[in-house]
Amino acid sequence: MTRQFDFNPAKVHTILNETWRHLNYAVETETHPWRLGTLATISDNRPRVRTVVLRAVEIEQRQVICYTDQRSDKVQELEENPWIEWVAYDPVTRVQIRLRGRAEVHTQNDQAARHWEASSPEHRRGYITVSAPGTQAETASPNLPDYLFDRLPNDEEAQLGYENFAVIVCQIEHIDWLELRRNGHLAARFLWTDKWEGHWKYA
């Protein structure tokens, strides 16, 4: 697949189809810029944003999925307020997407177990941490046990990380699409009721 964003200007829903196609491609392709998105949550009525890795897309369920440590701030923020916005931009196609919806955090359940089993030892090592994310540190050092600084965990060690592993499932209800053009930007919006409704809008 090329990174071209193909659509028919006379049929706005071709934008929606291409958006989901590119999201799905970003899951499979580490170099696709949509693989790294910005996830916004709310804490004390203020926005909190961070970069997350797109791990899975479920098109029929309108879901985009990322992982986190269940001790991270965003887990508590989502428990208090599930509304999220997810933003990604591709400098090749010059397309930005903003995905808005509700998030649900999964830990120690079938959903979490399924994603954990599909993850690599290198990825699992990131959850075998000494302290919770955000804990003050005395020196600039990785948040890993000493014995994992220079090697991957074995199967038994990797299971220690499952306790900290969380899956964030974002169900999307609103998509804003923007293509930056030198001769005038194009923009579209899609809203989910019992189906997707879309229209062009001015950028």
Image (cartoon, rainbow, N blue to C red):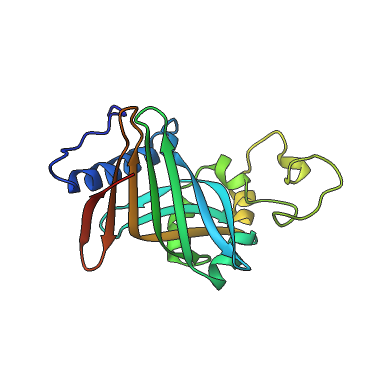
Q: Position of residue 126 (x, y in %)?
A: 62, 46
Up-down relation of residue 116 to residue 1 (above or below) = below
Which quadrant, please, contains the C terminus? top left
Which quadrant, please, contains the N terminus? top left
Up-down relation of residue 76 to residue 185 (above or below) = below
Residue beneath the point at 49% across and 68% down = 82
Q: Quadrant of residue 198?
A: bottom left
Up-down relation of residue 165 to residue 15 (above or below) = below
Query: Furthest residue to the right?
Result: 138
The one of 54 and 44 positioned closer to us in this rendering:
44
Residue beneath the point at 82% across and 49% down = 137
Q: Quadrant of residue 27?
A: top left
Q: Position of residue 76 (x, y in %)?
A: 60, 67
Q: Position of residue 162 (x, y in %)?
A: 58, 57
Residue beneath the point at 27% across and 55% down = 190
Residue beneath the point at 25% across and 41% down = 18
Q: Quadrant of residue 29?
A: top left
The one of 192 and 186 positioned closer to us in this rendering:
186
Residue 163 makes an appearance in the image = no
Q: Position of residue 46 (x, y in %)?
A: 60, 62
Residue 89 makes an appearance in the image = yes
Up-down relation of residue 81 to residue 184 (above or below) = below
